[in-house]
Amino acid sequence: MILKNRIHNAFNFYKNNFININSLEISNNTIKFSLKTSKNLNDFFMQKTSFIEYLNIDRNLNEVPEGILIIPILCNVLPVSWMFDSTIVINELDKTFYESISRIKNKYSNLYPKCDFKGKLLVKNIIDYEIEHNEKYLSFFSLGVDSTSTIINNIDKNPILVNIRGSDIPLEEEIGLNYISRKLTDFSEEFRLKKLFIKSDFRRLLNTQNLSNKFQEQLDDNWWHGLQHGMSIISHAIPYAYLYQISHVLIASTYSKKESEIYGVNEIPCASCPSTDNEFKFAKNGNVYHDGIENSRQDKIRTIINFLDDNDKNDYLHVCWKNTSGKNCNLCEKCSRTIMGILAEKKDPNDYGFKVNDKTFENIKENINDFSKNKITNVLWVSIQEKFLEDKNYWSNDKNIKWFLEINLKLGS
């Protein structure tokens, strides 16, 4: 069926700076959105339609009300509204989520004091939907270090594994998407966990390059990492959580309290932070928990290694965003950082999804200054170096590591 907005004529007052989500179409397991924007925002959208397909569900999305179904598209455009002081116009929204928006917005404002978070949200019908409070969990799972650690630490809760096709790997890269799907399926079967695959073109909606160019100075970050990925990813689970009455959504932390302290702040600014994610509420009893802030990336690597070793499993990690085949490229900053983190635990990265040889370390040595020059990633590289230095004598004669013990990685020192 098609649910069209019946927006009051008074909303036309905002026609010079608006985002109007003017239609929402449901077909079995797919939601299709259509929106209109004022001309001043055209350069910041690549398309004016978007879809989300829930690939392996056995119920119909028609059972989910419009005020819940609209949350994913709304979360993708809310930051645009805030930064451009635009008005979003929609027909219906869940009351609990509506009330959480102002809190989320305030938390982002605290993270980015150089930004002026404004904008308005006009909703014709605010409806108090409700799911039961229960102990059902779902958790986003990309097979990366953060999400794998969260799954392991919460495995006693039997979380449903949620993976979004089109988030890390583009939708057109079928080889890579299928590879990740197989790896995730293997993991779910090995540990008897249910899985949900979501197909979405949400990363094609916004022109993130233009948005990054415009707001780089205020954010000191790009649009995707700084403002978009947190709410955009979380919100994809909400229609499913409502449909299956799941009241707990887990999303893995990127940075720990310790890493934030090294950085010199209470929270490293990011689109997905505990202060923002934990304010995300829906359908009265639905909540989001930003999991793992007590654990550094090195702690998470240790958790994963110990768990896989205890269960006689390996080769599950996928951390690379550069290689669209689904496999780790073994050369980029994130692959290199993870390789070194595994090695610092005195384990062979070749056993955990990587292909490592002498050339791997030559690449790291050649690129370490570029890898660690960013203030945020520098914190993570310094932590790896500190782990190696805990047993300096063990590594001092290793030609591939000796140089890493001696290099000064700390910025400004």
Image: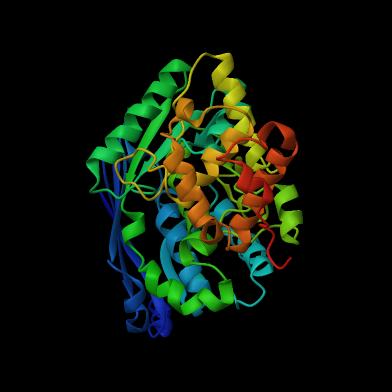
Along the line of sight, which residue is nearer the eye, 274 or 400? 400
How does the figure colour the protein chain or chains? rainbow
How many labels, in total? 0
Coordinates of residue 357 in the picture (x, y in percent)? 44, 35
* Picture quadrant of residue 309: top right
Task: Name the quarter where the C terminus is drawn.
Answer: bottom right
Does 319 appear above or below 32? above
Give the left or right position of residue 6, taking residue 100 as reference: left
Q: Nearer the viewer, residue 201 or 152?
A: 152
| Residue 68 percent coordinates (x, y) | 45, 49
Q: Residue at x 56, y 28 (%)?
A: 136
- Does residue 366 lie above or below 27 as drawn? below
Horizontally, is 243 left or right of 305 in the view?
left
Answer with the quarter of the image where residue 5 lies. bottom left
The residue under the point 63% across, 53% down is 273
Residue sitting at 66 percent across and 65 percent down? 111
Decide if residue 128 is in sight here.
yes
Choose between 39 and 214: the one closer to the eye. Answer: 214
Point out residue 404 in the picture as x, y percentages from the top left corner: 62, 47
Q: Position of residue 191 (x, y in %)?
A: 49, 17
Q: Is residue 234 visible?
A: no
Which quarter of the figure has residue 35?
bottom left
